[in-house]
């Protein structure tokens, strides 16, 4: 039990109002300092969004210092980052030094960042829309953990998004709403800072009420906070009804413009429009110009009392959308101007603002500057006793042991089929790892070979759903029963949802202190559809195994729209994601064991496997010596002779063509090597890190690419071959100054069978032989 006596309602309101003002001041000052006071070295704009902060300070004061419980998690709209830091400054979690370095190296980040900021950030935000939708998926993850006995129901928190109204234009919001409804979403609040301004302009009036309809259709409760208490009091007075009707019918742009113009303009306009109605003039006359401006902008989202009551009244677990009406730039001279998104107070305006708050020069960073001893100590106590102050730091979840993963047997195998078999064997094993695997796919479970795992482990759903086909005894290879113990989360065909689901699952360890090992499959070309969400997950340092399959031109008959070309470059270019492309099933098994371990390492990350449905002859191994090098990015399938003049370098499924070409060429090019690059990504990273280390860490060791290429003669020739962008391998020539003839796909493919396509797009052994001839004999 809390020994503290709860503050009275009036004391709470008064404390929250003070905190609202502190947050407004500190966020404005942080941005002002970075733009106007801190010396500039590069002539570039620093930026920051005072207007975006100002419209949400009351909402954040009421949420953080009143409604939020220690187990709740919040995504803060990107441009309110400074408000979040100001909150943690008041809580004692943020330093003045870092706030002084807002948007500078090592300082407060522009947008809340889980990994780069030093304060607790539950969800990164930045790319609008994603930070909102991710809260719904995290709520689903929470339900999954409860159903699997990894989290107690009483520890369930609310997943909350504080969002800008323009985020409601992002398609990923609606994809997420639909998925949320299917999965019976709960414990989720989205609070819209409904300032009716985006970056460019004021937002469309026509959307009024439409959002309510859309969300209610998807099972949400919608609570609109349009008026503040001061407005409600005015509406209750004689003439007030007319004023309320006028506000309700006022267009967004008109309201914004009048807000910017201030009290005199409000009076003129109101008198002209409704001054003739009974009691209106007397009502307006009872406010001076400044009060009238305050009254007209006393919207629900600026009234801490209204916000507090609304939050207090929504204590069940229904997903709830709060539409909190606000003014962008509230309380600042920027208020209402349509261009205020990047607008900033000039030094004179900032000075005026400081004076209006009674903050002495030199005291700008004081957390409680100008409040007086009594108020300061009351506020300090209020903040210290707010539930958020009891939030614990994220725990480090215990690691799940990774067992040996044997390679599936078979003389001919595709990597995709091998993937399915490895998961099936894991599903049948009693390994703890298998219990922590959660699979997911955007409506491609069967075609990406997750089916066998799902048959074993079932689909996850909070409420049991029988498999109708199974019950009716209709033969089907796939069991589709859904229950709380299931381990596959089936998603509709929306790749953005898929990547956000993976991001949320992969954050289970830091968010909930217990590990999940998410495995998601997607058709390789459609990674592009969810690329920003993939990047979002990686930026948040979420940990998952992404399987892109089938991939490349090798998909053959399905044609150019389904054949992925540039995904190797995506895999190479994406930080926090290690890309592997196995040729053989035993490589895949090694990579999956690596992945499950890497996903749990402190300095680990996520892994991307690019697979294919083409079965190829497997190679006989003399020993396991290939394995270590394969996990570093490449190994010699046929070792070159010392001083050899050439090597064939390949990645993935075209191993067969590379091997055939090697067999034909080896007599003519003595000592010819055959290099299997299992991860262009790791090889390239190692190479660039080695160069960077030269400047930072003394004498760096040779990288793996250098070590691999060391036996070749200086100036040797390399023929590179990949079913994807040739750029994924052609850079290898730069490692030791070798000539390269790069083969790969650099045009959209078309339908056809493999011999035709490999011939037309130059992926067959003939192409390798021709390229080798060109290297040595000239064109
Ligand atoms: C995906 C994406 N597109 C564009 C932007 C650039 N951008 C930043 S804020 C913004 C509009 C924000 O408006 P709103 O969400 O209403 O926020 P507020 O008015 O509270 O600042 C845009 C377009 C972005 N951050 N992310
Ligand atoms: Mg807005």
Image (cartoon, rainbow, N blue to C red):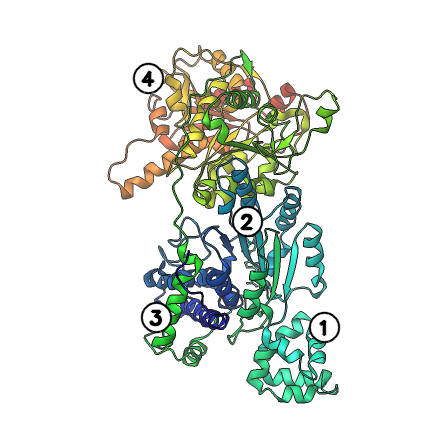
Q: Secondary structure at mark 4?
A: loop
Q: CA distance from mark 2 to mark 1?
A: 33 Å
Query: Earlier along the polypeptide chain: callout 2 or callout 3?
Result: 2
Residue holding disc 3: 366
Q: Seen in the image, is 778 located left or right of residue 372? A: right
Residue holding disc 1: 249
Query: Earlier along the polypeptide chain: callout 2 or callout 1?
Result: 2
Residue holding disc 4: 642
Can you say whether 749 is above or below 756 in the image?
below
Image location (x, y in percent) of residue 309: 57, 65
Tell me which residue sits at (54%, 35%) in the image. Answer: 567
Local crowd at mark 4 within 10 Å, few (<14), some, or many (≥20)? few
Can you say whether 521 is above or below 120 in the image?
above
Q: Secondary structure at mark 3?
A: loop
Local crowd at mark 3 within 10 Å, few (<14), some, or many (≥20)? some
Is there a contact, CB below 8 Å, between mark 1 and mark 3?
no
């Amino acid at each position: 039990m809390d020994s503290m006596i709860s503050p009275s309602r009036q004391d709470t309101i008064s404390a929250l109002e003070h905190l609202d003002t502190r947050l407004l001041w500190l966020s404005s000052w942080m941005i002002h300092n970075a733009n106007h006071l801190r010396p500039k070295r590069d002539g570039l704009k620093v930026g920051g969004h005072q207007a975006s902060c100002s419209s949400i300070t009351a909402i954040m004061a009421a949420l953080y210092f009143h409604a939020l419980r220690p187990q709740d998690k919040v995504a803060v709209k990107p441009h309110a980052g400074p408000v979040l830091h100001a909150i943690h400054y008041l809580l004692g979690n943020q330093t003045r030094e870092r706030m002084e370095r807002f948007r500078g190296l090592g300082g407060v980040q522009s947008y809340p960042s889980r990994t780069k900021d030093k304060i607790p950030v539950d969800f990164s935000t930045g790319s609008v829309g994603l930070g909102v939708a991710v809260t719904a998926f995290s709520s689903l993850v929470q339900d999954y953990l409860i159903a699997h006995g990894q989290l107690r129901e009483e520890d369930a928190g609310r997943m909350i998004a504080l969002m800008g109204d323009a985020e409601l234009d992002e398609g990923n919001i609606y994809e997420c709403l639909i998925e949320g409804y299917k999965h019976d979403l709960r414990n989720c609040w989205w609070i819209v800072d409904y300032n009716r301004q985006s970056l460019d302009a004021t937002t469309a009036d026509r959307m009024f009420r439409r959002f309510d309809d859309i969300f209610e259709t998807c099972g949400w409760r919608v609570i609109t906070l349009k008026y503040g208490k001061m407005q409600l009091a005015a509406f209750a007075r004689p003439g007030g009804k007319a004023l309320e009707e006028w506000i309700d019918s006022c267009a967004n742009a008109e309201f914004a413009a009048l807000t910017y113009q201030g009290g005199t303009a409000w009076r003129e306009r109101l008198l002209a429009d409704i001054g003739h109605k009974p009691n209106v003039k007397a009502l307006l006359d009872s406010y001076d110009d400044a009060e009238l401006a305050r009254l007209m902008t006393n919207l629900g989202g600026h009234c801490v009392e209204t916000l507090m009551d609304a939050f207090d009244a929504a204590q069940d677990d229904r997903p709830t959308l709060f539409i909190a009406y606000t003014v962008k730039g509230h309380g600042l001279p920027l208020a209402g101007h349509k261009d205020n998104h990047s607008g900033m107070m000039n030094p004179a305006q900032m000075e005026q603002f400081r004076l209006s708050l009674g903050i002495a020069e030199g005291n700008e960073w004081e957390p409680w500057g100008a409040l007086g001893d009594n108020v300061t100590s009351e506020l300090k106590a209020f903040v210290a006793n707010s539930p958020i102050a009891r939030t614990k730091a994220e725990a480090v979840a215990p690691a799940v042991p990774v067992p040996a993963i044997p390679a599936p047997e078979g003389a001919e195998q595709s990597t995709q089929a091998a993937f399915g078999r490895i998961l099936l064997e894991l599903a049948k094993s009693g390994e703890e790892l298998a219990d922590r695997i959660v699979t997911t796919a955007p409506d491609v479970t069967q075609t990406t070979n997750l089916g066998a795992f799902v048959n074993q482990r079932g689909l996850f759903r909070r409420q049991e759903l029988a498999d109708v086909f199974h019950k009716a005894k209709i033969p089907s290879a796939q069991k589709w029963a859904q229950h709380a113990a299931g381990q596959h989360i089936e998603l509709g065909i929306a790749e953005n949802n898929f990547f956000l689901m993976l991001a949320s699952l992969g954050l289970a360890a830091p968010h909930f202190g217990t590990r999940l090992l998410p495995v998601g499959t997607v058709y390789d070309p459609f990674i592009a559809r969810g690329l920003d969400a993939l990047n979002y997950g990686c930026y948040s340092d979420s940990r998952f195994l992404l399987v892109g399959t089938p991939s490349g031109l090798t998909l053959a008959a399905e044609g150019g729209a389904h054949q992925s070309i540039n995904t190797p470059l995506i895999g190479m270019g994406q930080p926090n994601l290690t890309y592997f492309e196995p040729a053989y099933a035993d490589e895949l098994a090694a990579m999956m064991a690596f992945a499950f371990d890497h996903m749990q390492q402190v300095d680990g990350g996520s892994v991307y496997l690019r697979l294919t449905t083409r079965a190829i002859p497997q190679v006989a191994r003399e020993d396991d010596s290939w394995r270590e090098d394969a996990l570093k990015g490449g190994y010699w399938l046929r070792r070159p002779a010392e001083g050899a003049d050439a090597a064939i370098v390949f990645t993935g499924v075209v191993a067969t063509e590379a091997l055939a070409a090697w067999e034909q060429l080896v007599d003519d090019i003595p000592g010819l090597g055959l290099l299997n690059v299992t991860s262009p990504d790791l090889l390239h990273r190692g190479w660039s890190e080695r160069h960077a280390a030269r400047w930072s860490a003394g004498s760096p060791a040779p990288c793996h690419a250098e070590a691999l290429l060391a036996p070749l003669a200086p100036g040797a020739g390399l023929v590179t071959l990949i079913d994807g962008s040739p750029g994924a391998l052609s850079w290898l020539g730069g490692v030791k100054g070798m000539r390269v003839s790069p083969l790969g796909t650099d045009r959209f493919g078309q339908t056809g069978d493999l011999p035709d396509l490999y011939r037309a797009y130059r992926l067959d052994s003939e192409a390798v032989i021709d390229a080798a001839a060109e290297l040595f004999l000239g064109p």
